[in-house]
Amino acid sequence: MNPVNILLVDDQPAKLLSYEVILEELEENLIKAQSAREAFEHLLRTEIAVILVDVCMPEQDGFELVSMIRQHPRYQNTPIIFVSAVMLAEPDRLRGYAVGAVDYVSVPIVPEVLRAKVRVFADLYRKTRELERLNAELEARVHQRTAELEASAAQLRQLNEELEHRIDQRTREREEALAQLFEAQKLDTIGHLTGGVAHDFNNLLMAVLGSLSLLKKRLPADERSERLVTNAIQAAERGTALTQRLLAFARRQELKPQAVDFLRLFENVEDLLAKAVGPRVEIRKRIPADLEPLLVDSNQLELALLNLFVNARDALESGGAVTVAAAAEEARPAGLAGGNYIKISVSDDGEGMDEATVLRAAEPFFTTKGIGKGTGLGLSMVHGLAAQSGGSIQISSARGKGTTVSLWLPVAQSIPRAQPAVVPAAAEPLKPVPRSLAILVVDDDALVRTGTVAMLEDLGHLPREAASASQALEFLAGGQECDLVITDHAMPGMTGAELARYLRSAFPNLPVILASGYVELTEDHALGRMLRMTKPFTQEQLQAAMDQALSGKVAAA
């Protein structure tokens, strides 16, 4: 039985810990959030089966949070349980049910009752997903047969084309391919640069967030100082989100491609897109019901659509229409691999762009919206998603005639899907190691190294530093005590991945945690099961990774 994700939302860490202790017998994945913002970050990144929400929270109470959750199409039917020590009167309960809760648990909590309630909803979620999977398999078989017939018909039409048309088409394709090759080379160069910048920026954010978190713990009880430090932490976290968009453009984000029914996906987010563009903009769609499923990360595709609609809204200052169209087309941009593709187009009838602006539209940080009105990363993110998904993007625009952004994305059956690695479920919950540990921190960035060492010292451990893999090997060769190695990946000379491989053979019982500023090991099957952290990471994430590594829960590669 695969564990499902259960989201626990409470602004008090002690209460979150008590929920975790009560629910650990269920052997499900428990995800904790201390604010509405943090809860929404988890909801957008992860499929959640059950949500437990505290009623009384400082920034947004539980009623407001649940009302906002219910507005997202994906979580309109997710079971939500209120937990509260106050507001237990009947009107309060009725208000909770009115905003979308399915149950109400009062404090003090009876552990057996809470476990029983959560277990029922978790099992219901599993059975629902299994039914959806069986339906999807049936639909996929039908779509596969349809695709085979359409492919045969396309081949017959291609054989019947006139020779003159073929020559004209090939000449046109060659000219377009040369122009696209030039643009692709330029964007690829910018992408490499952007990925490197994002990596270095993540290192800086790592040092900033780590230091601010430790400083916040040591500040005296001063509301103003705490507010300033919290503000700085939130700004650094926004920087983390910014680097994620940069990594999307640089094609170094971790995607989870799956078969996606585009019509259903669009209908699920149509209300959200309508709110984003406002009442003066009409949304039109031309999406056939029998469209083949796409092979793409559904969450990232939703975000790409939102970016395109926001751009269209900004181009329609006086109102207008945005049209979404999808169709299977034989003609496609040069450079795409063989297979079937779906073309998704988002068009507006706004003011449009001139040729020079179109050529730079997908470059990161390029924007025509003015200072403070845009980051210049919307189209960059869409371009990165298309390229990393094995597709392509084209922008067509002219002054006074509007803009059309077209995405070519692969059909789910046309590209073999990689089978995910099966990770055995943990037999028991991970338990932190109580004693002080000798930990070797390997990182060529002194700021990151210092910040990581400070977090480990604050946890009561005995960290040692190494500025390179060679220094780390010298330290270990000297026979000094070492319980754990935490190493960066992108280092000069020997990389962190190479160091980890060597340690696996030379010190098989020595746990290793690999940290990196971006995802660059997705195709390295030898390290695919190694415990990894993404920079910037918090002290809590560091502690959790250490507990997992030292409890022997990570399988040897």
Image (cartoon, rainbow, N blue to C red):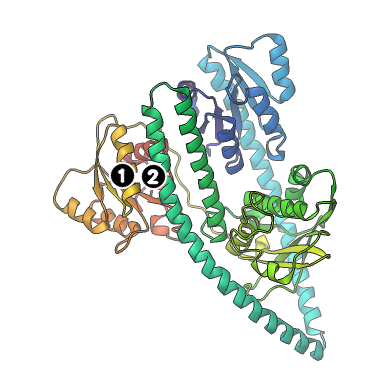
One can see residue 542 in this view: yes
The residue singled out by tag 1 in the image is 450
Q: Residues within 10 Å of mark 2 (few under 14, many from 20)?
A: many
One can see residue 427 in this view: no
Q: Position of residue 114 (x, y in %)?
A: 56, 19
Q: Position of residue 51 (x, y in %)?
A: 60, 29
Q: Residues within 10 Å of mark 1 (few under 14, many from 20)?
A: some
Q: Residue furthest top?
A: 89
Q: Quadrant of residue 391?
A: bottom right
Q: Residue at x 53, y 39 (%)?
A: 2
Q: Position of residue 234 (x, y in %)?
A: 51, 38
Q: Residue at x 41, y 49 (%)?
A: 204
Of the numbered discs 2 and 1, the one sitting upstream in the chain is: 2
Which disc number belongs to residue 27? none
The residue singled out by tag 2 in the image is 207
Given residues 82 and 516, the one toward you in this image is 516
Residue 278 versus residue 345 in the image, above or below: above
Given residues 146 and 372, the one toward you in this image is 372
- The amino acid type of the residue labelled 2 equals Ala
Residue 235 versus residue 357 in the image, above or below: above
Q: Secondary structure at mark 1?
A: helix
Q: Residue furthest left?
A: 478
- The amino acid type of the residue labelled 1 equals Thr
The answer to the question of whether label 2 and label 1 lie on touching residues, with beta carbons closer than 8 A, is: yes
